[in-house]
Image: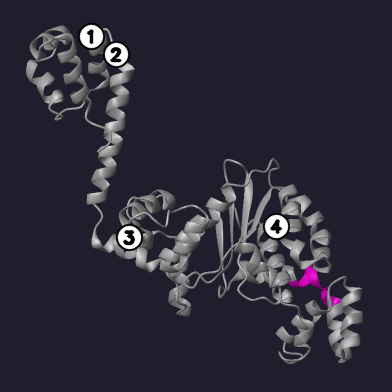
Amino acid sequence: MKNKHPGIELERKLKSIGMKNKELAIRTGVTEKHVSTIINGMKAITNNFARKLEYALDEPKAEYWVTLQAKYDKEFSEEQDKYNIDKDESKVLKEIKIIMPYLYEIGVLNENDDNIKKILDLRRFARISNLINIANLPHYGAYRIQLKTNVNINPYVLYIWQCACEYIAKKVKIENEVNYTLLKEKLPQIKSLMFSDPQNIENELQKIFYECGIIFKIVKYFKGAPVHGFIKKLGQSNNVVLCMTFRQKRADVFWFTLLHEIGHILNKDENNYLVDFEFAKGDEELEADNFANKELINQNDYKRFVDNDVFTLPAIKKFAKSQNVQPYIVIGRLQHDQIIGWNEYVNEIPKYEFIEEQINK
């Protein structure tokens, strides 16, 4: 160990001043055996005994001995941790193999460290004393949903991914607290970004969300964590975190998903946390879907457009212009509602290639 037991330093000090263990015992009011056990590294120097040493030895002061003991205890505890790692906990590294490169990328782990060091660092990162216990955490209904849908969820990947979202968000410092009224007022400005250069979309969205007290980030999608987004309110800063994945590259899906997540925030579904699974169903999800649909296209106008039964590209573009959205928004909605085929006008829907570039930076 780098930090030696303070008893070694005490023995050196006594030798330098020519004091025997027995004399120190008398001066500090303890037994000679007590002094010997400390010198032999079998007993700690307590705060009380450190104060007595200050009187008996004059120098160094009590704080010196307390600090030596604290450093030794910390390193000793960490060394003990290394021997408490069992085979099952080591297997967790294999379970989260898919997300490990991302943890290296964002600086959570060092790729060159051995597995023992990685496990210890992951414990701190995940705020858990044994990685195996991650599977027992009630994290966001993963098992309940898995039982109902048979969707493949890896609880370790899911939880570590969520921790990564929080880690990324906490590195962003914004002054404003979450402002739901302002967010609602900003919706037209947010929608208008679909007409801007795709390369600027994430940065422009971040600026708007920051004004509203929301930390926004597009994050990587990982197999085993089938999630559209993660929303959580950070209690101390009173900010909201919105991390959004984007597995598909279709522009229409991006904007619907974004408005869907904003719907969750305005509904204050994030008061504790919300992991928005791709396959989740329920009242909260239905309400967020309805919000996204209404914000993108006026529902009464859409019904009249569908009733006209004219879905030529010029007709779609004209209707899109009346709604202040891109034509691909209308095309995507018509495809989703099975009014036109999935292959119709598919070339009119841009692919947001920039998203993968952004999250790889």
Sort mark 2 into few (<14), some (14-19) or many (20+) by Cα contacts within 10 Å. few
Residue that numbered label 2 is attached to: 60
Q: Splitting the image into 4 quarters, where does residue 70 fall? A: top left
Instruction: Name the spot of residue 150 as percent of width and height, x first.
Output: 45, 80
Q: Amino acid at mark 2?
A: Pro
Residue at the image position 56 percent from the left and 60 percent from the top = 274
| Residue range (magenta) | 293-300
Q: Amino acid at mark 3?
A: Ile
Residue that numbered label 3 is attached to: 132
Q: Secondary structure at mark 1?
A: helix
Q: Earlier in the sequence, mark 1 or mark 3?
A: 1
* Horizontal relation, residue 229 to residue 68: left or right: right
Q: Earlier in the sequence, mark 1 or mark 4?
A: 1
Q: Is residue 272 visible?
A: no
Instruction: Name the spot of residue 208 as percent of width and height, x first.
Output: 76, 53
The mark closer to the camera, 4 or 3, is 3
Instruction: Name the spot of residue 13 as percent of width and height, x first.
Output: 20, 16
Residue that numbered label 1 is attached to: 57
Label drawn at residue 266: 4
Residue at the image position 67 percent from the left and 59 percent from the top = 267
From this view, report whether residue 338 is shown above or below residue 292: below
Does the magenta run of residues contain 345?
Answer: no
**306 and 201: which is toward the camera:** 201
Q: Splitting the image into 4 quarters, where does residue 183 fall? A: bottom right
Q: Earlier in the sequence, mark 4 or mark 2?
A: 2
Does the magenta run of residues contain 296?
Answer: yes
